[in-house]
Image (tube, helix red, strand yellow):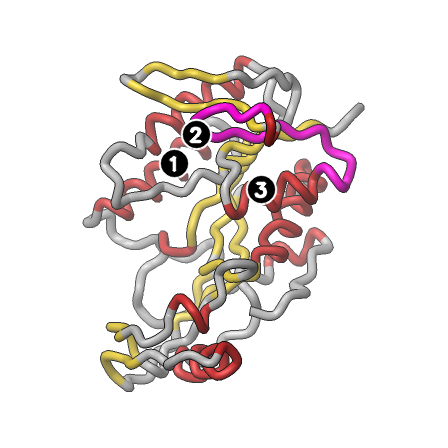
Amino acid sequence: MSKKLIILGAGWLGNALARDAKSAGWQVEATRRAADSTAQISAFCVTDSKLHHTLTLDDAYWVCAIPPRMRQTDSNYLETLKQALETAKSMACRGFLLCSSTAVYGTEDGEFTELAALAERDTKRQQILQGAEEMVQNAGGKIVRLAGLVGPEREPGRFISGKHLSSSSFARVNMLHQQDAVNGLLCILDNWSDAAPIYNLCHPSHPTKQDYYHKHCTQHGSVPPTFGSDTKSERIISGSAVCQLGFEYQYEI
């Protein structure tokens, strides 16, 4: 049976996933809000509660890599996800994988595995993130909680340069390279029947923010950030469970 994959959200992460999935022999359909035949992009968007799409792949795995864009009131994220799950079911979806965020966990110190308690839903961000996860779980799908993403066009030494961060200089970073994210997603798809319902993807190295950003700013020739405090902080996201599927973190953050 040929491997088929539908990727919702052909953006920074979705495009990289589509590229590598095709190289690995998957038949891929990727989507944006508007179709683009020259880039082989299908349409998938919700306007006025109505779904518009041009997908054709039945019996495929689905990965939702659409960013929630919580600052944009017109993102229709949860409505789009609801329509996606219904459409996936109607197209005999073999498995639905949601790209979520490790931001669902609280901000207190400690090590957060996939079994850790989630943050209180007292912010719009948490309502959207946790609402999306519940929707996917109730539909029988799986969830990948991604740490902060870096990689091509997302160089920490550039985007953090000269900024003042409210966090502590001694807080630990929880980051993930784009290529490890792509490889992790493909590993879960390749081992779908053995995969757990939820995985964290986060690099096992957790330097302090001061050390991490100073290193990148030095390499990039930019101004290091300043921090709101120097309080010791140990909030660590554990991304080791996915390694039981044979996955290995290979790319420096």
The quadrant in which residue 159 appears is: bottom left
Span colored in magenta = 22-37
Up/down of 179 relative to 27, above or below: below
Residue type at tag 1: Glu
Residue bearing the label numbered 1 = 134
Pointer 1 local density, CA inside 10 Å: few below 14, some 14–19, many at least 20 = some
Residue 188 highlighted magenta (yes or no): no
Q: Do the CB atoms of the residues marked 1 and 3 lie less than 8 Å apart?
A: no
Viewer-proximal residue among 209 and 94: 209
Q: Is residue 95 visible?
A: no
> Does the residue at mark 2 contact the one at mark 1 (Cβ under 8 Å)?
yes
Q: Label 2 is placed on what type of residue? A: Asn
Residue 41 image point, x, y percent: 56, 28
Query: Residue at the location (37% across, 37% down)?
Result: 132
- Magenta region includes residue 31: yes
Q: Which residue is mark 3?
A: 15
Q: Which mark is residue 138?
A: 2
